Image (tube, rainbow, N blue to C red):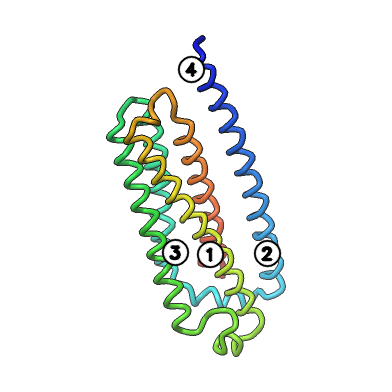
């Protein structure tokens, strides 16, 4: 076994372990937020149901479809790099990147519409609705905003990986960074899969 292959093997194992540990801590963190949401909803069921009707289910569904497709494209990019299809890998990562940006643009307009109608924590409009609605939108902005931050981080990571693939630094014999980015992106998608029904669908 050559020195190069030894380093590749070590890099692969260490990087994957680090990523799985990171994913575990993220799941614990968001799990705690989901518990807070569940408790608050139990105490303010009617208010949460009424506040949830103010959200646009179509936009939420559309964003869900976007993330599911992006999860598929980044998974396909890992397969394509293993098959030595460099150009296809770059294209698939580019598609994932575009879908991520579309998600953020949709979220921007969704937030903008809610803020324009005074549905944000601290607003006089929301204060008139009551404590339960204020809690709902507080959690909505915090949790979806935190998820959007993870999307932005994902966009940065995917862009870096796409450049590295294009330059040949990531290839069929060394693609652990692409795998880890894919794992991170799947985490982002899984978090949204939970956020979507909690805020948009449960009445």
* Crowd around label 1: few <14 · some 14–19 · many ≥20 (10 Å): some
Q: Quadrant of residue 80?
A: top left
* Above or below for 105 versus 72: below
Q: Is residue 13 left or right of residue 77?
A: right
First in sequence: mark 1 vs mark 3: 3
Q: Nearer the viewer, mark 3 or mark 4?
A: 4
Nearer-N-terminus badge (1/4): 4
Q: Earlier in the sequence, mark 3 or mark 2?
A: 2
- In front: label 2 or label 4: 4
Q: Residue at x 51, y 59 (%)?
A: 149
Residue 161 quadrant? top left
**Circle 1 SS class:** helix
| 167, 174: nearer the viewer | 167
Residue 38: image tag:
2
Q: Earlier in the sequence, mark 2 or mark 4?
A: 4
Between the C-alphas of marks 1 and 3, the distance is 14 Å
Give the image location of residue 203, x and y in percent.
56, 70
Residue shown at 44%/30% (left/top)? 175
Location of mark 4 (residue) = 4
Residue 92 on image: x %, y %: 33, 41
Mark 2 to mark 4: distance in Å? 50 Å
Q: Give neighbour class at mark 3: few <14, some 14-19, many 20+ (Cα, 10 Å).
A: many
Point out residue 126 in the picture as x, y percentages from the top left corner: 57, 85
Residue at numbered disc 3: 60
Q: Is residue 34 shown above or below 182?
A: below
- For the residues bearing labels 2 and 4, Cβ distance under 8 angstroms: no
Q: Distance of mark 3 from mark 2, alpha carbons?
A: 20 Å
Q: Position of residue 62 (x, y in %)?
A: 39, 60
- Rendered residue at 61%/87% (across/down): 127
167 and 104: which is toward the camera: 167
């Amino acid at each position: 076994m050559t020195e190069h292959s030894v380093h590749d093997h070590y890099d692969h194992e260490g990087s994957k372990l680090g990523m799985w540990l990171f994913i575990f801590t993220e799941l614990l963190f968001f799990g705690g937020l989901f518990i807070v949401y569940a408790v608050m909803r139990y105490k303010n069921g009617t208010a949460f149901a009424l506040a949830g009707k103010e959200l646009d289910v179509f936009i939420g569904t559309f964003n869900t479809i976007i993330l599911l497709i992006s999860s598929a494209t980044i998974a396909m990019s890992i397969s394509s790099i293993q098959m030595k299809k460099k150009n296809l890998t770059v294209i698939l990562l580019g598609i994932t990147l575009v879908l991520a940006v579309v998600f953020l643009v949709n979220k921007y307009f969704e937030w903008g519409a809610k803020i324009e109608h005074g549905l944000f924590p601290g607003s006089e409009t929301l204060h008139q609705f009551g404590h339960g609605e204020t809690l709902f939108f507080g959690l909505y902005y915090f949790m979806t905003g935190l998820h959007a931050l993870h999307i932005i981080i994902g966009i940065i990571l995917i862009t870096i990986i796409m450049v590295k693939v294009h330059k040949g630094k990531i290839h069929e014999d060394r693609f652990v960074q692409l795998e880890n980015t894919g794992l991170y992106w799947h985490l982002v998608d899984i978090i949204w899969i939970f956020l979507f029904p909690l805020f948009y669908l449960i009445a």
